[in-house]
Amino acid sequence: MKLTEVDFVKKIVGMMAGNGYKTQIEVPNMGQSMDILCEKNGQLHAIEAKLYDWRRGLEQCKTHRLVCDYIYLAIATKRISSDLKYWIQKDGYGLIHLKSDGECHIQIEPSKKWSPWVAQRKQFMRNVQFNSDKNFKKVEK
């Protein structure tokens, strides 16, 4: 069975919820949509999930810097290229990888804490309603 982006997002949300994060999917942010927003201890973590096109994912992550403390790119490729590792580390992002065992793992922790734009973060948070369940119940695209 072929993995869909919806299935991939469900796996990521399950991993983050299992680690004590509150989550919300598809959060509007400055004309685009953040795939997953996570919160723990007052810190906001953005996750952009891509099955293959990690370059596009890195571009989308730039907008999330304005509202989140930490940024992750999640990728479902069979292997992690040296180019991807270079850009993740250069930009200070974290990397989540779907491994062959079917589970998501944090491969690289974010090395940079962003300083969100206060006014934009307040606007952004108006759209946030975290899922309090640890189980991901509904995903619609």
Image: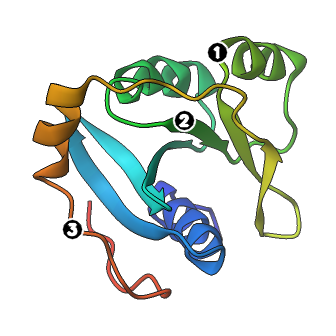
Tell me which residue sits at (40%, 37%) in the image. 68
Q: Which mark is residue 129?
A: 3
Q: Nearer the viewer, residue 53 or 87?
A: 87
Instruction: Say which residue appears at 19% left-offset and 49% top-offset.
Output: 125
* Residue type of the residue flagged with mark 1: Asp
Neighbour tally class for label 1: few under 14, some 14-19, many 20 plus, Cα within 10 Å: some
Instruction: Report the Cα–Cα distance between label 2 and label 1.
Output: 9 Å
Direction from residue 93 to residue 32 in the image, left or right = left
Cβ atoms at labels 2 and 3 below 8 Å apart: no
Image position of 56 (left or right of 66): right
Colour mode of the rendering: rainbow
Q: Mark 2 belongs to which amino acid?
A: Ile
Give the mark nearest the N terminus, 2 or 1: 2
Coordinates of residue 137 in the picture (x, y in percent): 37, 86
Q: Secondary structure at mark 1?
A: helix
Query: How far is mark 1 from mark 3, CA to CA?
Result: 28 Å
Q: CA distance from mark 2 to mark 3?
A: 19 Å
Give the residue pinned by disc 1: 91
Residue 8, picture quadrant: bottom right
Q: Name which residue lies at 35% across and 27% down.
A: 116
- Report x, y in % for residue 108: 80, 39
Tag 2–tag 1 contact (CB < 8 Å): yes
Q: Position of residue 75 (x, y in %)?
A: 67, 42
Q: Which residue is mark 2?
A: 71
Classify residue 107 as left or right of residue 98. Answer: right
Q: Amino acid at mark 3?
A: Gln
Q: Does 84 appear above or below 32?
A: above
